[in-house]
Amino acid sequence: MRVSSTFAALLLLCSTATLADPPRTFSEAKKIGWKLYGRQSVEFYCGCKFRGHRVDLKSCGYVPRKNPQRAARIEWEHIVPAWQIGHQRQCWQTGGRKNCTKNDKVYQRAEADLHNLVPGIGEINGDRGNFAYGWLPQSPNQYGACPVVVDFRAKLAMPRKQVRGMIARTYLYMSDRYRLRLSKQNRQLYEAWNREYPVETWERQRNQQVGCVMGWGNPFVGGFDKRSCPS
């Protein structure tokens, strides 16, 4: 099977994912994520190669904006930020993320949902923070050749084209599964990206592999078959 390095950014090459109980916490999800992505070599944001926790910045022309140490390490990114998952819930209003993680079972499941987790460059993870993804007019130049824009004033991040469709389908999935409210503007954007950047083979493969761990797939991606999960 031939897969371009761009699409391999999110292709799970682990063939041993079995249908089991989904992770109960974010910590559990990260441990499973390292195993699932253990044999792949390209991260989410820029398509940089990585080995273990370390990123090969030269492989994608990445130039750190401010924090070289964080730029050189892999972190686990919530495509839909934990803040967006939690701030609409009562637990967040009374005790923030810590309270939600400890006491809200819906939040716990959403925070640990592997369909919403990807490995990415730490500096961009930090820069993006809680910002939603969206379209921005600026040319990408903050991180060298990495085609990502973070607008701190507008509180938006513009992802590279190769993952916009996946991002859109993840937002739509998380909104439906966990009843997260999306603004009308954001929903329209993600529905447009869903149409403009249709599901590709690598995304279906990822959906199948993650689905075998979670027990269900992302219906906006489609193609999940429990019978194909290793027993």
Image: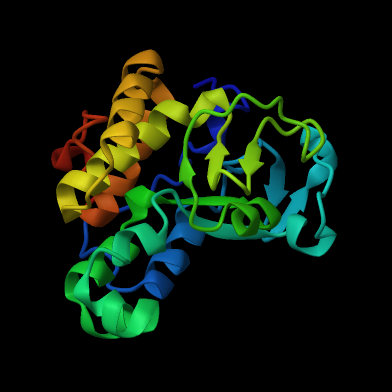
Q: Is residue 14 above or below residue 126?
A: above
Q: Is residue 42 visible?
A: no
Q: With 215 as the anchor, is 137 left or right in this view?
A: right
Residue 56 position in % (x across, y down): 79, 46
Residue 94, placed above or below residue 41? below
Tell me where residue 70 sits by quadrant. Answer: bottom right
| Left or right placement of residue 225 versus residue 174 in this view | left
Q: Quadrant of residue 157?
A: top right
Q: Is residue 202 left or right of residue 21?
A: right
Q: Nearer the viewer, residue 218 or 161?
A: 161
Quick one: which residue is furthest to the front in this view? Answer: 153
Tell me what residue is drawn at x 53 percent, y 42 percent: 156
Q: Residue at x 50, y 50 (%)?
A: 131
Q: Residue at x 25, y 69 (%)?
A: 107
Residue drawn 60% across and 50% down? 120
As drawn, the residue found furthest toward the top would be: 196
Image position, residue 45 (x, y; %): 60, 40
Using the rendered image of the protein, determine whether residue 9 is visible from the camera's viewpoint. yes
Q: How many marks?
A: 0
Q: Position of residue 27 (x, y in %)?
A: 42, 74
Q: Is residue 51 above or below residue 197?
A: below
Provide residue 190's location: percent of width, then percent of height. Answer: 34, 30
Q: Nearer the viewer, residue 110 or 206?
A: 110
- The part of the image, by quadrant, that contains residue 161 is top right
